[in-house]
Image (cartoon, helix red, strand yellow):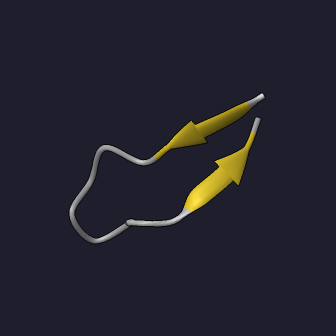
Amino acid sequence: ALRMALFPEQKFIYEL
Protein backbone atom coordinates (compact mmCIF):
# COMPACT_ATOMS: atom_id res chain seq x y z
CA ALA A 1 0.00 0.00 0.00
CA LEU A 2 1.05 3.61 -0.41
CA ARG A 3 1.10 5.91 2.57
CA MET A 4 2.05 9.52 2.90
CA ALA A 5 4.59 10.46 5.53
CA LEU A 6 3.12 12.53 8.35
CA PHE A 7 6.42 14.25 9.02
CA PRO A 8 7.13 17.67 7.46
CA GLU A 9 10.63 16.48 6.63
CA GLN A 10 9.22 13.56 4.67
CA LYS A 11 6.78 14.89 2.10
CA PHE A 12 7.23 11.89 -0.14
CA ILE A 13 5.17 8.73 -0.47
CA TYR A 14 6.75 5.42 0.48
CA GLU A 15 5.70 1.84 -0.03
CA LEU A 16 4.79 -0.40 2.85
- Left or right of 10? Residue 1 is right
Residue shown at 59% from the left, 56% from the top: 13
Image location (x, y in percent) of residue 4: 48, 44
Outermost residue toward the bottom in this view? 9
| Residue 9, placed above or below residue 13 | below
Query: Residue farthest to the left?
Result: 8
Query: Is 14 located above or below residue 2 in the figure?
Result: below
Query: Hey, which residue is sitting farthest top in the picture?
Result: 1
Total marks placed:
0
Q: Is residue 8 left or right of residue 5?
A: left
Question: In this image, 3 relative to 2: left or right?
Answer: left
> Residue 7: x and y, percent?
27, 54
Please tell me which residue lies in front, 16 or 2.
Answer: 2
- Please identify the quarter of the rendering in which residue 8 is found: bottom left
> In the shown orientation, is residue 14 left or right of residue 3?
right
Q: Residue at x 30, y 43 (%)?
A: 6
In the rendered image, the quadrant that contains the N terminus is top right
Residue plotted at (38% across, 66% down): 10
Locate the C terminus by quadrant. top right
